[in-house]
């Protein structure tokens, strides 16, 4: 066979850049695809386009000033990041948070989980060509943001809560907004579900698309809805309860195939479970203080700052970051919107962390993306990424 004939017989692939600024990726990701027509042969992902050096930033900030930069990690459910950080510091200093503050935290975290899942599931619908469901359900996300705004003054980057508890109790208006959401959300969620759940086009586009087995998911270190969709019932709230989650009754929804449809279904069911948890917290809300007796970390009331020397001193020391913490090494994880959201903190007794590592679930499960889309069509690869809920801020940190 001649050299020319050999070259003709060799397969030629097309190189396609998916990203880094393609609108279908819903974030700043680059994937260099080798395409055989419409079929993906291989994929080389590139990350780091919005890397902000979160861990290094944290090592130069006092403990109470780190919470605002956790907002920018998974910005779809920022309060869970905030609470995870506060609980990590509380574990280090040995602080016991009052029961009422724990229940308020649970309400805020579950609202954030619903907001996160609304985004993911509605975007899956958009990527299959169903825009209406996205428009219908997003109004409910606005209601959640209105509750956040009433609680802490912010909507997206919340910086809510404080080390030791909450900065303030729910106002009557916050309770009113919460009751309105709890009453009306099930109807809207059912409407969204009716649009997609048994829709033949949606099912054809999502069933057996981007599937991953439980064994492979565990090998990659999956957690959260993506792992549960593969059939593994791991949930940090149940395995290692925090913030009084052991007081609540809820189910852990799991899938069977680990495909895009299962990931959609798991998140859909988790929204219902989160709503149940919120109702239980509202019904059984304890009385008492909303923050622990930790004056080293909790800003005193303004009226005391203006009239009492001790309060003024604490205000100054906290704002200037002069409060030291014990030496130690702790790891604390919460169940974030995308899975196990962990903070590994090392303190040398100084005013800032000696080292801080953030276990971001997006970074871990995005490694499986090339394997999950190999052999699929380009349109299915977009859908698979949406169903994994890869958040650029959390991926790159």
Image (spheres, helix red, strand yellow):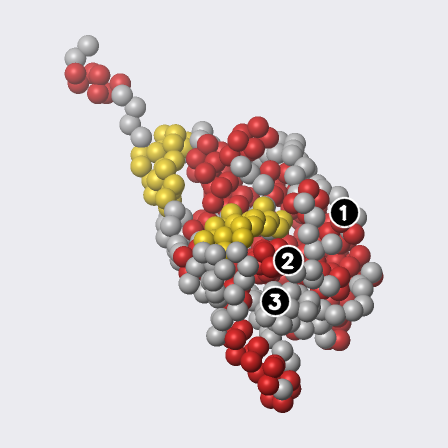
**Residue 83 falls left or right of residue 38:** right
Residue 138 picture location, percent across and down = 61, 60
| SS at mark 2 in the image | loop
Camera sees residue 122: no
Q: Position of residue 95 (x, y in %)?
A: 65, 60
Crowd rating for badge 2 (residues with CA inside 10 Å; few <14, some 14–19, many 20+)? few
Label 2, on which residue?
94
User: Which numbered circle lies on residue 250?
Assistant: 1
Disc 3: CA contacts within 10 A as few (<14), some (14-19) or many (>=20): many
Identified at 30% across, 23% down, the residue is: 11
Q: Is residue 201 above or below residue 357?
A: above
Helix, strand or loop at label 1? It is loop
Residue 71 percent across, percent down from the top left: 52, 62
- Residue beneath the point at 73% across and 66% down: 178
Quarter of the rendering occupied by the N terminus: top left
The reply to whether residue 331 is visible in this rendering is yes
Q: Residues within 10 Å of mark 1 (few under 14, many from 20)?
A: some
Task: Please determine whether, in this image, residue 208 is positioned above or below residue 271.
Answer: above
- Taking depth in this image into account, of 223 and 8 the one nearest to the observer is 223
Q: Nearer the viewer, mark 1 or mark 3?
A: 3
Q: Residue 208 falls in which quadrant of the image? A: top right
- Residue assigned mark 3: 162
Answer left or right for 278 relative to 81.
Answer: right
Q: Earlier in the sequence, mark 1 or mark 2?
A: 2
């Amino acid at each position: 066979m001649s050299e020319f004939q050999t070259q003709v017989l060799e397969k030629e692939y097309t190189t396609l850049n998916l990203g880094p600024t393609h609108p279908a990726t819903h974030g700043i990701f680059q994937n260099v695809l080798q395409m055989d027509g419409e079929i993906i042969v291989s994929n080389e992902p590139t990350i780091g386009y919005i890397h902000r050096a979160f861990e290094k930033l944290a090592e130069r900030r006092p403990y109470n000033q780190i919470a605002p930069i956790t907002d920018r990690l998974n910005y779809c459910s920022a309060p869970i990041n905030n609470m995870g950080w506060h609980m990590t510091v509380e574990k280090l200093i040995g602080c016991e948070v009052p029961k009422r503050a724990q229940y308020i935290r649970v309400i805020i975290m579950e609202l954030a989980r619903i907001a996160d899942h609304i985004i993911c599931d509605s975007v899956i619908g958009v990527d299959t060509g169903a825009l209406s469901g996205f428009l219908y359900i997003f109004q409910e996300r606005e209601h959640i943001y209105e509750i956040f705004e009433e609680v802490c003054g912010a909507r997206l980057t919340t910086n809510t809560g404080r080390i030791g508890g909450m900065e303030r109790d729910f106002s009557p208006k916050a309770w009113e907004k919460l009751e309105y959401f709890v009453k009306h959300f099930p109807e809207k969620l059912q409407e969204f579900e009716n649009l997609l759940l048994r829709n033949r086009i949606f099912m054809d586009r999502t069933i057996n698309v981007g599937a991953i087995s439980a064994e492979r998911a565990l090998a990659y270190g999956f957690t959260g809805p993506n792992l549960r969709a593969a059939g593994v019932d791991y949930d940090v709230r149940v395995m290692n309860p925090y913030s009084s989650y052991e007081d609540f009754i809820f189910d852990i929804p799991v899938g069977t195939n680990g495909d895009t449809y299962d990931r959609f279904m798991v998140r859909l069911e988790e929204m219902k479970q989160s709503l149940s948890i919120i109702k239980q917290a509202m019904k059984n809300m304890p009385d008492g203080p909303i923050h622990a007796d930790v004056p080293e970390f909790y800003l005193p009331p303004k009226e005391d700052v203006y009239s009492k020397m001790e309060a003024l001193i604490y205000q100054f020391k906290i704002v200037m970051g002069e409060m030291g913490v014990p030496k130690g090494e702790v790891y604390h994880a919460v169940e974030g919107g995308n899975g196990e959201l962990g903070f590994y903190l090392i303190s040398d007794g100084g005013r800032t962390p000696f080292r801080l590592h953030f276990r971001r679930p997006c970074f871990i499960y995005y490694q499986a993306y090339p394997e999950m889309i190999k052999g699929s069509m380009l349109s299915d690869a977009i859908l698979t990424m949406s169903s994994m809920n890869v958040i650029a801020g959390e991926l790159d940190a």
